[in-house]
């Protein structure tokens, strides 16, 4: 994908009155791509020569590509994996229970860990979620038997299984939207910060402008923080 992008740059260079500019974003979750739409729309109006590239990148590769310069920014939940890079928060996503519309929890205004004690859980692979979410999953496991647990390799797989009624998925609200499902706020769980990781902002006016626009609009249903 990076090689194709570089060849595209060469083909278009010099054929437009507008300067050809690129920004390459890596996103760990397809559900979070929508957060980039509004700031990209503003950039398109102000910088017509901008050609953004959006990539869904596995967590194990994202920060290596950022370090190598193949990506300008990585959109991800705050985690120790990105500690070597500059982080700018976009929103703080609360934890929710995602369940099928006919699940007993679906009609409740909120749920607690005690409400989930005898409820089957659907969990993603630990590598697919940040450490804060993994710790909250571990706290919910308790003395459950294997019969009360279902696993999915990815967040998308977990959401699908929850929609099918196999159990409840506990996820940041940002990842939990799906047809036929209901989000129930989970009390007592710490919200998770989501934002953009960058290697270096010095002498990067284009990236700085994008970050400024990305931090301006509030995201519906998410709690804005003053961390930045």
Image (spheres, rainbow, N blue to C red):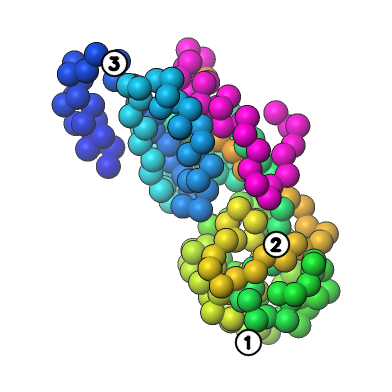
**Which residue is under mark 1?**
147
Question: Judging from the image, what secondary structure is the residue with disc 3 in?
Answer: loop
> Could you tell me if residue 143 is visible in this image?
no
Which tag is nearer the camera, tag 3 or tag 1?
A: 3
Question: Which residue in the protein does label 3 denote?
Answer: 18
For the C terminus, give its image quadrant: top right
Q: Nearer the viewer, mark 3 or mark 2?
A: 3
Classify mark 2: residues with Cα within 10 Å, few (<14), some (14-19) or many (20+): many
First along the sequence among labels 2 and 1: 2
Disc 2: which residue: 96
Decide which of 207, 154 is in the foreground and name it: 207
Q: Are marks 3 and 1 in contact (CB under 8 Å)?
A: no
User: Mark 3 Cα within 10 Å, few/some/many (few <14, many 20+)?
Assistant: few
Q: Taking 69 as reference, is 193 left or right?
A: right
Quarter occupied by residue 65: top left
* The N terminus lies in quadrant: top left
Q: Which residues are magenta?
A: 202-228
Residue 93 vertical placement versus 14 (above, below): below
Which is nearer the N-term, disc 3 or disc 2?
3
């Amino acid at each position: 994908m990076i090689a194709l992008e570089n060849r595209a740059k060469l083909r278009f260079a010099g054929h437009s009155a507008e300067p050809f500019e690129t920004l390459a974003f890596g996103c760990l979750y397809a559900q979070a791509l929508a957060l980039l739409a509004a700031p990209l729309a503003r950039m398109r109006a102000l910088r017509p020569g901008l050609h953004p590239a959006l990539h869904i990148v596995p967590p194990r590769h994202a920060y290596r590509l950022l370090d190598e310069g193949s990506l300008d920014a990585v959109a991800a939940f705050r985690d120790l994996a990105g500690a070597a890079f500059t982080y700018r928060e976009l929103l703080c996503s609360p934890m929710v229970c995602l369940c099928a519309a006919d699940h007993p929890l679906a009609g409740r205004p909120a749920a607690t860990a005690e409400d989930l004690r005898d409820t089957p859980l659907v969990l993603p692979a630990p590598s697919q979620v940040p450490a804060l979410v993994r710790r909250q999953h571990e706290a919910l496991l308790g003395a459950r038997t294997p019969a009360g647990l279902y696993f999915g390799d990815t967040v998308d797989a977990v959401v699908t299984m929850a929609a099918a009624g196999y159990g409840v998925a506990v996820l940041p609200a940002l990842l939990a939207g799906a047809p036929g499902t209901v989000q129930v706020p989970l009390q007592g769980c710490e919200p998770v910060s989501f934002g953009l990781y960058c290697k270096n902002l010095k002498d990067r006016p284009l990236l700085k402008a994008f970050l400024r626009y990305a931090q301006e609009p509030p995201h519906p249903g998410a709690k804005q923080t003053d961390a930045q």
